[in-house]
C-alpha cells in the first residue's frame, strides 16, 4: 500500500498490525506500529528512510512497483536503527552506488550494522540538497534518540520528516492525526516519550528551540512511526516541550510486588491516608509482576511521587521489582519524589534496598520507608494509613 501525502510526496512504508513487542521485549506495542518511508518524486527522486528488517523484501518489491528503482536518485537515512534502515541492504543490492545521505554518526552506525561501503554523503545541520524546484534541508538531531539521528525538511511542501521524534507506535488505517481516536493517539505519544525520550529531555528542548528559531513554515510533521501530523502539527511540538520540562500531574502511583499479600495490603491502606491529606490527587496502584512495565513507566512519567514496595526474599527484593528499578534508573526521571515500603518475616532488607536503589538513581526518597513484620495487624494498618498521609504531604 502507498498513498499520496502531499503533491509529489508519497508514503511507501509498512503498517505492522501484529507488532506487540519492540526493541526485543523492551517496549510493548499494544496497537502495533508503522515504519514510515517516504518517496519524494521531484525532478530528482529521494527516498527517506526504509522499514524494519523483516519487511525488507516486501518493501523493496512494493517500491519497485511504485517506481523503477534505478529512478531513485538519493536515499536519506535519517536514522540507522534497523526499524528504519532495515531494508537498506536489500535496496542497495538493487541500486548499488546511489548516494546515501546521513550524519557522520550515521555512517558509523550504518557501517556497524551492515558492514558495507555504500556511497555515503555526510550532511550536517543547514546543508541543502536540491531536488529541482524544492530542496531538502538537513537538521542533525543527536540523541533524539540515537547519536546518528537526523531530520530533514522539504521546502515548498513545508514538511518536516522528524524520524522517531513525534512518533507513536500506533497502527491505523487512518494515517493522519485528525482522523484517529485522540485518546488513543495521545496515550501512545506519551508512552513513546516516557519510555524512549525521557533520558534525552534536555536535548529535546534544545533541538525544538533550535528548529523553531529557523522559522520554517511547517504544514506537516511526518515522523517515522504512526500517524502524520497535518492538523495543527505544532500541537505535538507543544506537548514535547511540556513533557521535556520534568512533566508531572497531580498523581501518586504505588508500585509493588507481593508474595503472600502483606505488601499488597500495605499498599492498599496507603490510599486512605493519601485521601485524608488530599482529596483531589489521582492515586493508582500496580502490582508490577502482573502489569505491563511500559504502561507503568508512563504512569511514573505522569506522577509527582511514586511509592515502591517489595517484601524481603533471600535478603533482597522480588525480581519483577528489581527489573523495574533498573528501568527507572536508566530513564533518569527528574523532579519526582519516592517512598518505599515492604513486609518481612525475619531479616527485612528490602526497604533499605529499595531506598538505596532509588537514591542512587537520583530520586528524592522522602523518608526511611515503612516495614511491616508478617501480616499487617490493626496497628500496622494504622501505621500504613499514617504513612500514606505523611508521604502525600511530602510529595507536594
Ligand atoms: Fe530509533 Fe524507530 O528507531
Image (spheres, helix red, strand yellow):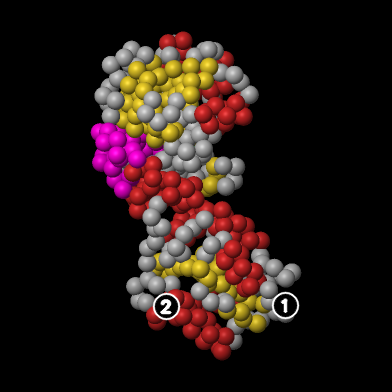
- Report, in whole angstroms, how far the alpha carbon at label 1 lies from the one at label 2: 30 Å
x and y, in percent, of residue 146 in the image = 51, 39
Q: Is residue 204 above or below residue 91?
A: below
Mark 1 or mark 2: whose residue is earlier in sequence: 1
**What's the mark number on residue 269?**
none
Q: Residues within 10 Å of mark 2 (few under 14, many from 20)?
A: few
The residue at 33%/12% (across/down) is 43
Of all residues, the one furthest to the bottom in this rendering is 379
Residue sitting farthest toward the right: 314
The nearer-to-camera label among 1 and 2 is 2
Q: Secondary structure at mark 2?
A: helix
Which residue is located at x 37 percent, y 14 percent?
Answer: 44
Q: Residue 159: within the magenta?
A: no
Q: Position of residue 296 (x, y in %)?
A: 50, 58
Left or right: 15 in relation to 6? right
- Name the one closer to the observer, 323 or 137: 137
Determine the residue positioned at 65% across, 82% down.
373
Residue 289 x %, y %: 60, 61
The image quarter containing residue 218 is top left
Which residue is identified by label 2? 393
The residue segment tinted magenta is: 210-238
Mark 1 surroundings: few (<14), some (14-19) or many (≥20) residues within 10 A = few
Residue 335 shows in this picture: yes
Q: Secondary structure at mark 1?
A: loop
Amino acid at each position: 500500500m502507498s498513498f499520496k501525502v502531499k503533491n509529489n510526496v508519497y508514503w511507501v512504508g509498512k503498517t505492522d498490525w501484529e507488532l506487540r513487542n519492540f526493541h526485543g521485549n523492551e517496549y510493548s506495542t499494544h496497537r502495533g506500529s508503522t515504519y514510515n518511508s517516504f518517496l519524494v518524486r521531484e525532478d530528482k527522486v529521494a527516498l527517506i528512510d526504509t522499514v524494519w528488517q523483516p519487511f525488507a523484501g516486501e518493501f523493496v518489491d512494493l517500491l519497485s512497483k511504485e517506481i523503477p528503482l534505478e529512478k531513485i536518485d538519493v536515499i536519506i537515512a535519517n536514522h540507522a536503527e534497523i526499524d528504519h534502515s532495515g531494508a537498506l541492504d536489500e535496496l542497495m543490492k538493487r541500486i548499488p552506488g546511489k548516494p546515501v545521505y546521513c550524519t557522520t554518526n550515521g555512517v558509523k552506525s550504518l557501517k556497524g550494522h551492515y558492514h558495507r561501503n555504500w556511497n555515503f554523503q555526510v550532511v550536517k545541520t543547514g546543508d541543502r540538497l536540491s531536488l529541482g524546484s524544492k530542496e531538502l534541508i538537513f537538521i542533525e538531531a543527536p540523541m533524539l534518540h540515537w547519536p546518528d539521528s537526523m531530520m530533514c525538511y522539504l521546502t515548498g511542501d513545508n514538511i518536516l520528516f522528524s524520524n522517531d521524534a513525534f512518533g507513536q507506535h500506533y497502527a491505523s488505517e487512518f494515517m493522519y492525526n485528525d482522523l484517529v481516536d485522540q485518546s488513543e493517539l495521545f496515550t501512545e505519544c506519551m508512552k513513546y516519550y516516557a519510555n524512549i525520550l525521557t533520558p534525552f529531555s534536555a536535548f529535546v528542548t534544545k533541538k525544538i528551540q533550535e528548529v523553531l528559531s529557523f522559522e520554517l513554515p511547517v504544514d506537516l510533521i511526518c515522523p517515522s512511526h504512526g500517524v502524520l501530523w497535518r492538523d495543527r502539527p505544532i500541537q505535538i511540538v507543544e506537548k514535547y516541550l511540556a513533557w521535556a520540562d520534568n512533566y508531572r500531574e497531580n498523581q501518586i502511583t504505588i508500585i509493588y510486588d507481593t508474595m503472600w499479600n502483606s505488601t499488597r495490603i500495605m499498599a492498599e491502606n496507603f490510599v486512605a491516608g493519601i485521601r485524608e491529606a488530599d482529596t483531589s490527587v489521582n492515586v493508582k496502584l500496580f502490582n508490577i509482576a502482573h502489569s505491563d512495565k511500559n504502561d507503568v513507566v508512563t504512569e511514573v512519567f505522569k506522577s509527582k511521587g511514586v511509592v515502591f514496595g517489595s517484601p524481603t526474599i533471600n535478603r533482597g527484593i522480588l525480581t519483577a521489582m528489581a527489573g523495574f528499578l533498573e528501568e527507572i534508573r536508566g530513564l533518569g526521571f527528574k523532579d519526582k519524589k519516592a517512598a518505599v515500603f515492604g513486609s518481612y518475616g525475619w531479616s527485612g532488607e528490602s526497604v533499605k534496598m529499595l531506598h538505596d536503589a532509588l537514591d542512587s538513581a537520583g530520586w528524592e526518597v522522602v523518608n526511611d520507608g515503612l516495614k511491616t513484620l508478617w501480616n499487617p495487624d490493626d496497628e500496622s494498618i494504622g501505621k500504613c494509613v499514617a504513612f500514606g498521609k505523611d508521604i502525600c504531604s511530602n510529595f507536594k
